[in-house]
Image (tube, grey):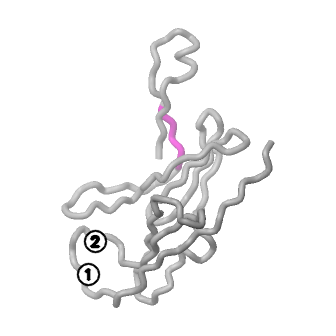
Amino acid sequence: MVIATWPVASSVSSGAAPSWEIRRLTEWERRWDFGGHGTLDFEVEVFGSEAQPDGRVRVDLRAFGERRSIVMDQELRALGEGPTSPWPDGLDVVRGDFPGLQVNMLHGRGVGSGGGRYVLRWESLPENRDRPYADHPQGGPLEVVRLPEVQDGPAG
């Protein structure tokens, strides 16, 4: 995965024309195949970034089926990468016993009457480029889950 920043600080301070600076953030050796017909299988999805209190930046993403975070310094150089989960323990764990099931969740767009946030949770087989599976699971529950309130840390 690469990141491009604009403008490069050194070009601005030196009076040179601004330019993009491209940096490699990961050492992934996999390739994402965009070809084919039907539903595109998204091998990499970027969910967003968040500034950390110490000035670092965390980027949350899903890469090749695994939720991950990349932490960068203030110059947007990668410091580390590892698996993460944005959900309370167990919420993103498959409960069904059919082989290949995955957990899907969709954030609610509003705030509940009690101030909480909600997600819709269900389990399914992954995309299959609009081709039928030879076998499929029985229907499972569609759940509305209230997430715990996030407490802000002390000011400072």
Identify residue for label 2. 128
Q: Earlier in the sequence, mark 2 or mark 1?
A: 2
Q: Secondary structure beneath disc 2?
A: loop
Quarter of the image for residue 126 reads bottom left
Amino acid carrying mark 2 in the image: Asn
Amino acid carrying mark 1 in the image: Tyr
Magenta extent: 22-26
Q: Residue at (67%, 45%) from the top-left corner? A: 52
Q: Residue at (31%, 70%) from the top-left corner? A: 127
As drawn, 34 above or below 6 = below
Q: Is residue 69 left or right of residue 110?
A: right
Quarter of the image for residue 42 reads bottom left
Identify residue for label 1. 133
Q: Secondary structure beneath disc 1?
A: loop
The answer to whether residue 85 is seen in the rendering is no
Mark 1 closeness class: few <14, some 14–19, many ≥20 residues within 10 Å: few
As drawn, 103 above or below 78 = below
Mark 2 closeness class: few <14, some 14–19, many ≥20 residues within 10 Å: few
Quarter of the image for residue 130 reads bottom left
Characterize the magenta stretch by its predominant secondary structure: strand
Q: Residue at (40%, 80%) from the top-left corner? A: 100
Kindly check if marks 2 and 1 are in contact, taking CB atoms under 8 A apart as contact. yes
Q: Position of residue 84 (x, y in %)?
A: 60, 62
Q: Position of residue 67 (x, y in %)?
A: 52, 62
Label drawn at residue 8: none
Label 2 to label 1: alpha-carbon separation: 8 Å
